[in-house]
Image (tube, rainbow, N blue to C red):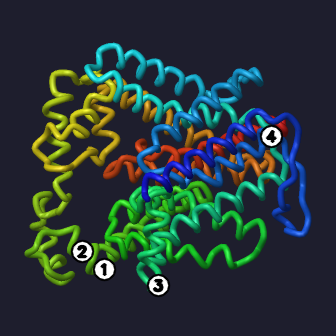
C-alpha cells in the first residue's frame, strides 16, 4: 500500500510538472483576494505554484526520483528561457561552491552517493535561478503566499491530528507514505511561521496567526528539540531584520523562553538530560556542574566524533569525497546500529568536502541572508520585494540552525525550496523596481 501511494504521488506530480513546464500560454487560477474570481498566470508561474503546493510531498521511497524530475525540468526551463544570472552575488559564490562539489566527486570513493548529495545542493540553486526570471505582481505574490501557507498547515495537521482524533491511525496510514516525515516538517516550520505572519500583515486577518502557537506545540509534543531551536533562531532573525541592534532584549527573551521550555516541558527535559536530572529543580541546583556528558544527544555526539575522526582528520582541507559519509551510514558499516544519517549537515560537509567546502557553503548562506536583509531594509524597494526577502532570509536562518542537529540538506525539497523560491521573488521584484 505504501509503495502504491508513493508511486501515485510521484506520477501525479511528474505529470503536472511536465504539463506546466511545456504548455505554452496562460491558465486561470482562483484569485487570492476573492475565490469567486480567477486571474491568469503564465505556465512558468503555474509551475512555481505547483512547487509550493507539493514541496511537502516526499513520495516515500521515490523521493530521489521526484527530486530528479524537478531537477530535469528546471534545467530544461532555464535553457529554454536563456537565464541571466547577474542579479545577485549569490549566484557567483553558489556557482563556485557547486564547482567545488564537482571537484570533490573526482576523488570520492562513492560516486553514486556523491551525485545524490550534489543533486540536493544543486536543486536550490536551480530554483532561485528559475524563479528570479519570472514576472511577479502583487496578486500572484499573495497567491503564492497562500498556497505555501496551506501546504504548511496540511503538513502540520498530519502530525497533529493523529494525536487528538480517533481516526488518527487512518490519517497516518494514508499520508505518512506521501508527506515528508515529522522531523523534516518541524525543520520546515521556520518558514511556515514567517508565511503566517506576513499573510496577517498583508490581509489584517487574525486567522493566519491562530496556527502559530501550534508550530511551537508540535516539537514539544513530539519531543523534537531541533524544532524549538529552529523556531527560536527564526524569531531572533525576525527581530534583527525588523529592529537591528535594538533587538538585543528580544534575543534575551527568546533564549530564556527556549531554556524554560526545555526545563519545564517533561518530554523535552527527559530527552535533553540524563536520568539523574529528573526535574527542573535538580537541574537548576546543579547547573554549574552540568557537563556535555549530561546532555542526551541520542548518540549523535558520539557519531559526530567518530565521523570526524575517520573522514575528516588528516583530510581537513578537502575532506574524503562527496557522498562518502552518507554511503557509510546507509550501508550500516559503522558502530551506531541502524543509524542511517549523521544528523548534522555541517559535520557531513566537513567530512565530505573539508574546511574549504564548509567555508564556501557558509558564504552562500551568509550572502543569501545579507542580501535579504538589505532588500528588506531598503525603503525604496517594493513592499512585496521586502516581504519576500524578509520571509526568505529569516526562515533560512531558522532552517540552517536545524542543520546543526538534523539533515536539512537531505530534505531540500521541503526545507530549502520554499526560502529559495521567495528569494527568487525578491530578486524578480527588485528587477521590476530597477
Residues at circles 3 and 2 in contact by the CB criterion of under 8 Å: no
Nearest to the observer: residue 195 or residue 23: 23
The residue shown at (72%, 43%) is 47
Q: Secondary structure at mark 3?
A: loop
The answer for how far apart the CA atoms under marks 2 and 1 are is: 6 Å
Q: Neighbour class for label 1 at 10 Å: few (<14), some, many (≥20)?
A: some
> Is residue 153 visible from the viewing direction of this image?
yes
Residues at circles 2 and 1 in contact by the CB criterion of under 8 Å: yes
The residue shown at (30%, 36%) is 348
Callout in the foreground (4, 1): 4
Q: Which residue is mark 4?
A: 43
Q: Neighbour class for label 2 at 10 Å: few (<14), some, many (≥20)?
A: many
Of pointers 1 and 3, the one earlier in the residue sequence: 3
Q: Neighbour class for label 3 at 10 Å: few (<14), some, many (≥20)?
A: few
- Estimate the x, y position of residue 31 in percent, counting from the top left: 85, 61
**For residue 422, side relative to residue 236 (left or right):** right
Nearest to the observer: residue 385 or residue 296: 296
The answer for how far apart the CA atoms under marks 2 and 4 are is: 49 Å
- Estimate the x, y position of residue 18 in percent, counting from the top left: 69, 37
- Estimate the x, y position of residue 280 in percent, counting from the top left: 21, 81
Mark number, residue 165 = 3
Callout in the foreground (3, 2): 3
The answer for how far apart the CA atoms under marks 3 and 2 are is: 26 Å
Q: Which residue is mark 1?
A: 265
Quadrant (top left/top right/bottom left/bottom right) for the C terminus: top right
223 relative to 6, above or below: below
Amino acid at each position: 500500500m505504501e509503495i502504491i501511494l508513493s508511486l501515485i504521488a510521484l506520477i501525479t506530480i511528474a505529470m503536472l510538472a511536465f504539463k506546466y513546464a511545456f504548455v505554452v500560454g496562460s491558465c486561470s487560477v482562483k484569485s487570492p483576494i476573492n475565490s469567486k474570481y480567477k486571474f491568469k498566470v503564465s505556465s512558468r508561474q503555474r509551475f512555481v505554484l505547483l512547487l509550493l503546493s507539493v514541496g511537502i510531498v516526499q513520495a516515500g521511497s521515490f523521493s530521489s526520483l521526484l527530486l530528479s524530475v524537478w531537477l530535469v525540468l528546471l534545467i530544461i526551463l532555464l535553457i529554454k528561457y536563456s537565464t541571466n544570472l547577474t542579479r545577485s552575488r549569490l549566484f557567483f559564490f553558489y556557482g563556485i561552491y557547486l564547482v567545488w562539489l564537482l571537484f570533490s566527486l573526482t576523488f570520492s570513493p562513492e560516486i553514486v552517493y556523491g551525485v545524490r548529495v550534489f543533486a540536493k545542493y544543486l536543486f536550490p540553486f536551480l530554483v532561485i535561478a528559475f524563479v528570479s526570471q519570472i514576472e511577479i505582481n502583487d496578486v500572484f505574490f499573495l497567491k503564492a503566499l497562500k498556497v505555501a501557507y496551506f501546504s504548511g498547515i496540511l503538513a502540520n495537521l498530519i502530525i497533529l491530528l493523529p494525536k487528538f482524533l480517533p481516526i488518527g491511525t487512518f490519517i497516518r496510514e494514508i499520508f505518512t507514505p506521501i508527506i515528508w516525515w515529522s522531523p523534516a516538517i518541524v525543520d520546515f516550520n521556520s518558514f511556515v511561521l514567517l508565511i503566517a505572519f506576513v499573510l496577517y500583515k498583508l490581509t489584517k486577518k487574525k486567522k493566519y496567526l491562530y496556527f502559530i502557537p501550534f508550530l511551537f506545540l508540535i516539537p514539544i509534543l513530539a519531543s523534537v528539540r531541533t524544532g524549538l531551536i529552529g523556531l527560536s533562531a527564526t524569531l531572533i532573525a525576525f527581530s534583527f531584520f525588523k529592529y537591528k541592534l535594538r533587538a538585543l532584549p528580544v534575543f534575551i527573551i527568546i533564549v530564556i523562553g527556549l531554556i524554560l521550555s526545555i526545563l519545564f516541558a517533561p518530554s523535552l527535559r527527559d530527552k535533553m538530560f540524563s536520568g539523574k536530572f529528573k526535574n527542573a529543580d535538580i537541574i537548576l541546583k546543579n547547573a554549574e556542574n552540568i557537563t556535555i556528558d549530561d546532555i542526551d544527544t541520542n548518540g549523535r555526539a558520539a557519531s559526530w566524533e567518530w565521523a570526524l575522526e575517520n573522514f575528516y582528520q588528516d583530510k581537513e582541507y578537502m575532506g574524503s569525497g562527496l557522498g562518502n559519509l552518507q554511503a557509510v551510514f546507509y550501508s550500516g558499516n559503522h558502530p551506531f546500529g541502524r543509524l542511517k544519517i549523521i544528523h548534522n549537515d555541517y559535520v557531513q560537509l566537513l567530512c565530505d568536502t573539508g574546511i574549504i567546502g564548509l567555508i564556501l557553503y557558509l558564504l552562500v548562506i551568509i550572502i543569501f541572508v545579507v542580501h535579504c536583509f538589505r532588500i528588506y531594509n531598503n525603503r525604496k524597494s517594493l513592499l512585496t520585494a521586502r516581504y519576500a526577502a524578509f520571509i526568505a532570509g529569516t526562515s533560512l536562518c531558522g532552517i540552517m540552525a536545524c542543520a546543526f542537529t538534523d539533515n536539512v540538506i537531505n530534505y531540500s525539497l521541503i526545507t530549502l525550496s520554499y526560502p529559495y523560491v521567495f528569494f527568487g521573488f525578491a530578486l524578480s521584484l527588485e528587477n521590476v523596481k530597477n
